[in-house]
């Protein structure tokens, strides 16, 4: 009778080889056909909700960037679950798990990162369908503020349709020409959407309404109201 332990070891070795191949053997620098971050989040956290015949599954295992992102999300989720257990058993903190929507849905809180002493919040702001006021910062009373948590944030900002890739500047302010926070980041086109990635720490801001300014020099600033909670 075959040794089941040897069989299990061979199976684990084969799976490891397949994983290494998926991580490195299918470069896709232009991210052609990638299903997007939302699908990878669902696949990592709720795999059974995706049918096995979904063609996006085949893409993920034949696209190294997608498979790498999937692996990172699963790893972050595992670390996150461990932190929840430790925090709850020690009654030291309340940790929000899974995917939570902030405000009107324009900002999506995804998962906390597992690196560093001050845990950053990975979040996504969708500006694709929001009207942005260019020039002097003004706020329309009809424009609903985007709600943003207080703390160190790693923002993924989906810029309006037609935005060019490149370096962008970001600022948070209340008064004209008196930015409270200034940052910059690189925007690239992912699945047809221009996405700006930037780290922002809102811990120093008191709860309230502000303006979020974004621009690609030398263009004018474009503003959206935000609320820090």
Image (spheres, helix red, strand yellow):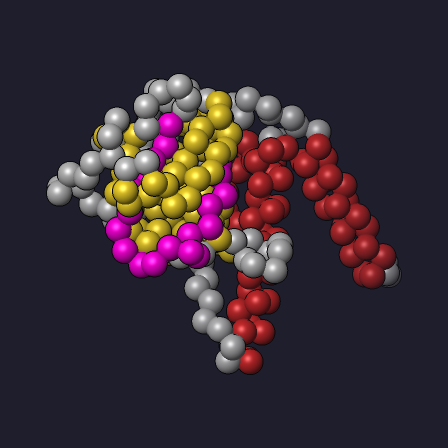
- Magenta residues, dominant SS class: strand
In the rendered view, would you say 13 is above or below 4? Answer: above
Q: Position of residue 170 (x, y in %)?
A: 41, 36
Q: Nearer the viewer, residue 64 or 183?
A: 183
Is residue 216 depicted above or below 15 in this figure? above
Could you say which is closer to the camera, residue 93 or residue 30?
93
Q: From the viewer's perspective, tell me whether residue 78 is left or right of residue 195.
A: right
Q: Residue at x 32, y 23 (%)?
A: 220
110 or 131: which is nearer to us? 131
Q: Is residue 211 magenta?
A: yes
The foreground one among 201 and 111 is 201
Q: Quadrant of the N terminus?
A: bottom right
Q: Residue at x 35, y 46 (%)?
A: 107
Q: Which residue ends up furthest to the bottom in the rendered image?
A: 90
Place of residue 79 in the rendered image (x, y in percent of width and height, measured from the top left): 60, 60
Q: Which residues are magenta?
A: 197-215
Q: Quadrant of the C terminus?
A: bottom left
Q: Is residue 22 magenta?
A: no
Position in image of residue 141 (x %, y %): 13, 43
* 114 lies above or below 157: below
The part of the image, by quadrant, that contains residue 106 is top left
């Amino acid at each position: 009778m075959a040794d089941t332990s040897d069989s299990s070891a061979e199976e684990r070795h084969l799976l490891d080889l397949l994983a290494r191949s998926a991580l490195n053997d299918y470069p896709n620098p232009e991210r052609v056909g990638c299903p997007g971050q939302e699908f990878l989040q669902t696949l990592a956290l709720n795999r059974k909700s995706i049918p096995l015949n979904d063609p996006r599954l085949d893409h993920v295992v034949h696209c190294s960037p997608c498979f790498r992102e999937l692996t990172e999300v699963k790893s972050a989720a595992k670390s996150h679950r461990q932190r929840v257990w430790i925090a709850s058993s020690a009654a030291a903190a309340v940790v929000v798990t899974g995917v939570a929507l902030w405000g009107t849905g324009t900002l999506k809180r995804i998962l906390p990162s597992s690196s560093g002493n001050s845990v950053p919040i990975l979040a996504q702001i969708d500006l694709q369908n929001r009207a942005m006021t260019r020039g002097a910062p003004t706020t329309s009373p009809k424009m609903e503020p985007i709600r943003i948590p207080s703390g160190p944030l790693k923002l993924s900002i989906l810029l309006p349709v037609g935005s060019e890739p490149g370096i962008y500047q970001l600022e948070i302010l209340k008064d004209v020409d008196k930015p409270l926070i200034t940052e910059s980041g690189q925007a690239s086109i992912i699945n047809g959407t221009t996405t700006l990635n930037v780290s922002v720490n809102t811990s120093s801001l008191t709860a309230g309404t502000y303006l979020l300014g974004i621009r690609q020099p030398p263009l004018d600033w474009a503003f959206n109201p935000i609320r820090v909670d």
